[in-house]
Every structure is written in C-alpha cells, then in structure tokens.
Image: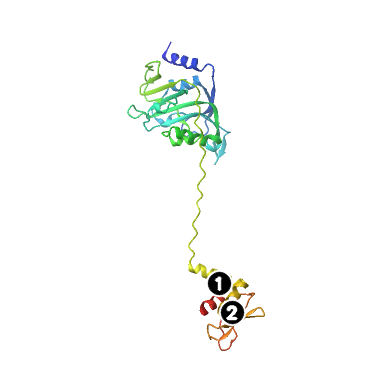
Amino acid sequence: MSAIDAIVERVCIALEHDWRTWHGHAFANRYDRVGVPSSWDVLALLGMMLEPVLGTSKERLPLWSPTVYGPAYRERGQLVCRRSSNTVSVTMVVLDVDDGTPLEQLLEPGAFALAHTSWSHTPAYPKWRVVYPLAEPVPAQRWAATWRGLAAKWPAIDPATKDPARMYYVPAVRERAPLLCPGPSPLTARRGTYTLRIQLGAWLTLPAPIEEAPAPVTRKAPAPYRPDTLRRDVAAQLRTDPAARERVAELVGARIMGGRARHAPCPACHRPAVWWALVPTGAGWAYCNHRQSCGWTGPLDELARVTA
C-alpha cells in the first residue's frame, strides 16, 4: 500500500459514519470572476492537498473557494459571479495565517482539519492554511458575525478572510519532490518544503458569533450662541411678536392706545413722539410723528437699544 493510500484509508475509516460533500467554486486564476460550481468530499480534498500542483508563478495558480454563489450576472458588460453581494453560503472555514503563528495554535482539539503550508511558506517563517469543513453551511447573512467569532478565537487569521467571496490558491510546489510520511501520529505528509497535517475528529463546532456593536451615537455640540445671532433673533421677534412689541413699549415708557404704542422717546429728536403698531404690518418699524422736522423711522430693536 502506498503512503497516499494509507493516509486515505485512515481518513475514510475515521469518517465512514459521517460522510459529507461540501459545495463551492473553482477559479482558473485570480482574475477569474465567474469560475465554475464545484463540490468536494473528503477524498477530493485529500487529493487536492496530497498532490499539490507544480507551478512557477503564484499568479498562474488556480484557486478554490468554499463559497456557494447565486447565478452569474452582467456588470458593466462583463459576466461576474464572485461578488460578496452574490454569496449564498460558506461551507468551510479557512484560516489563512501568514504571521508565523505555530500550527498548534490554529488546530481546534477534537475537530477534523486539513492544514497545509502556503506558497510563500518557509521553515523559518511558517505560513499555514487550515481548512475546517463544516457540518452545516453558514448562510451569507450570518457570515460577518461568524467571522468575528472566528477572529476572536484565532486573532492571527488574515482579516481579508472576512470577505465571504474570498478564494484561495490551491496547494502548490515549485519543484517536484517525493511524498514522505514521517509517521502515523500526527498524520503528516511532506513534499519538499510543502507540508500537509491531517487532524482527525468531528466537524468543527463554530465559536459563538459576535454581532456587530451598534455605532456610537455622536451628538454634535451646539454652536456657541454668538452675540450677532442673538441680535438677529431679537430683531426677528420684535418684527413679528405683538407681546414682544408691547414689552418694548413698557421698557421705553410708551403708552398703549388703540392698538399702538405712542409717545416713546425719539432716538433722533429726543421728543416723545415715536409710535408703532402692536400687531405689525409690513416691516413692523416705529415712526416719529415729527416727519418734517425729524423724520426718524427704524426697527424696534434699534429703538430699544438707543433708549435703554
């Protein structure tokens, strides 16, 4: 029995009572926005990860995504499918970690996981991709809260994986190398610098989703009440409010007679000859009775200010 057959047999025996298929999409390259619907069982996932493709450039590698999309549609004349707004569900959790975090910190005890090194991995600076197939897909509308729960549990994961439309390069190597299986525990396969770790167990129980906190309500501080604003407000009130106009009459010593304030001191000739209507018409100004010798006229706020 070959090393690959031995690994596959162990995995199949461990999962024979809970065999599942996960749906997603495959893409020819990073510029592919349509892709093709795909599905994988454990054998297909093992095949992809035990037999990494040979490549010379990351840009030319095919990609896969554990995301189910709605129908393709036209956008600016181009057919597209891979859009966050077009996602239906996510069927696997993929932890993409490239900050050197040890693999042991990314493996959930008791959960089935397939962990492989990524294209830019080096032994001195490990970069891992850990795939957790799920018992049930996560609906697209719940993915953001689910991802926040994952990020709280594994803070090292790439923030870009928050996007449900995220796709991942297939496992790849730069040079051909024989498959080496160091031992049965942990279940590991190596091809040169490429490493695959298989952890047997149950399907991942997702950490509790974290709902997005509501945005804090910021109340804009009212602008300071400037003197010129106050003057404008007072002037507007004195032009329109009969009660305010009557109050001015009291302040300047005018007499109320027949709906008018009379005998207020004139700011120009200083004689008690100014009058105004309590119920304003037009501009609502006050007038001096001595039209020939004085002729003063003006708004009530000016009269109140001068005679105050």
Residue 301 x/y as whole percent: 54, 75
N-term-proximal mark, 2 vs 1: 1
Q: Residue at x 54, y 78 (%)?
A: 303
User: Which image quarter is the N terminus in?
Assistant: top left
Q: Residue at x 44, y 13 (%)?
A: 6
**Amino acid beneath label 2:** Ala
Tell me: residue 19, above or below residue 271. above
Residue 281 x/y as whole percent: 64, 75
Distance, label 2 to label 1, CA atoms, is 13 Å
Q: Residue at x 41, y 14 (%)?
A: 3
Report if residue 64 is visible in the image.
no
Task: Point out which mark residue 286 bears.
Answer: 2
Residue 152 x/y as whole percent: 45, 35
**Amino acid beneath label 1:** Ala
Determine which residue is flagged by label 1.
Answer: 235
Give the number of marks. 2
